Amino acid sequence: MAVNIFQGDTFKGVISLRTIDVVDPTKTNTYIIPTGATIQINFPGITASVVLSTANAGEITIINASTGTLSYTGSPLKSVLLNPGKNQSLDLIVTDTAGNVTTFEQPKIINVYARANP
C-alpha cells in the first residue's frame, strides 16, 4: 500500500515493524521495540533525507512496543522538503539504549506530489 503525500500538507501514518523469520523466510515476526529506543524515519528529501524522530516531540509515537506499532506525523514545513516522485523508499532506524542499530527499509512505498497552484 503506497503512502501519498502532498508537499505543504501535514502527513501521518502508522507503521508495524516486522522482521523476516530466520527459519522460514516466507514468514515474518513481530519486532518488539526496545524500551528507551530512539526511532527515526527517513523520508526522501530534495537535498537530504527528511527525518522524523522520537527526539522531536509529536513526530513519532510508540503505540504498542510489544507489537512494534508506531505512528508518525510530519509537519507541512517538513513535507515541503520531500522529494516529489513516485515509488520512493522509506527507511526506519531503531537504536536501543546500548547503541545497537536495527534498520528497516520499505522500498517503493512513498509517493510525493507537488501541490498544484489554483
Image (tube, rainbow, N blue to C red):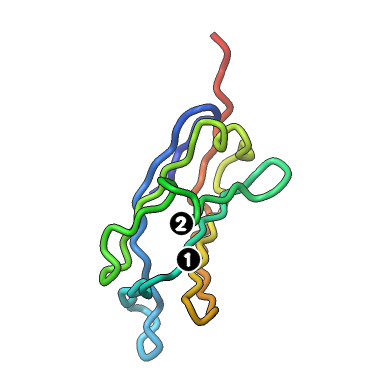
Q: Camera-side residue: 69 or 55?
A: 55
Q: Quadrant of the C terminus?
A: top right
Q: Is residue 20 above or below residue 111?
A: below
Amino acid type at mark 1: Thr
Between the residue at mark 1 and the residue at mark 2, the CA separation in whole angstroms equals 6 Å
Residue at 52%, 70% in the rendered image: 103
Q: x, y (%) of residue 86? A: 56, 42
Kindly identify which residue carries mark 1: 38
Dot 1: what SS?
strand
Q: Is residue 10 above or below residue 16?
A: above
Question: Residue 16 has which mark?
Answer: none
Kindly identify which residue carries mark 2: 54
| Upstream in sequence: badge 1 or badge 2 | 1
Please tell me how crowded label 2 is: few (under 14), some (14-19), or many (20+) other residues with Cα within 10 Å.
some
Q: x, y (%) of residue 14? A: 34, 51
Residue at 40%, 88% in the rendered image: 22
Please tell me how crowded label 1 is: few (under 14), some (14-19), or many (20+) other residues with Cα within 10 Å.
some
Q: Are marks 1 and 2 in contact (CB under 8 Å)?
A: yes
Residue at 48%, 69% in the rendered image: 94
Q: x, y (%) of residue 79? A: 55, 35
Q: Is residue 117 above or below residue 115?
A: above
Q: Residue furthest right?
A: 47
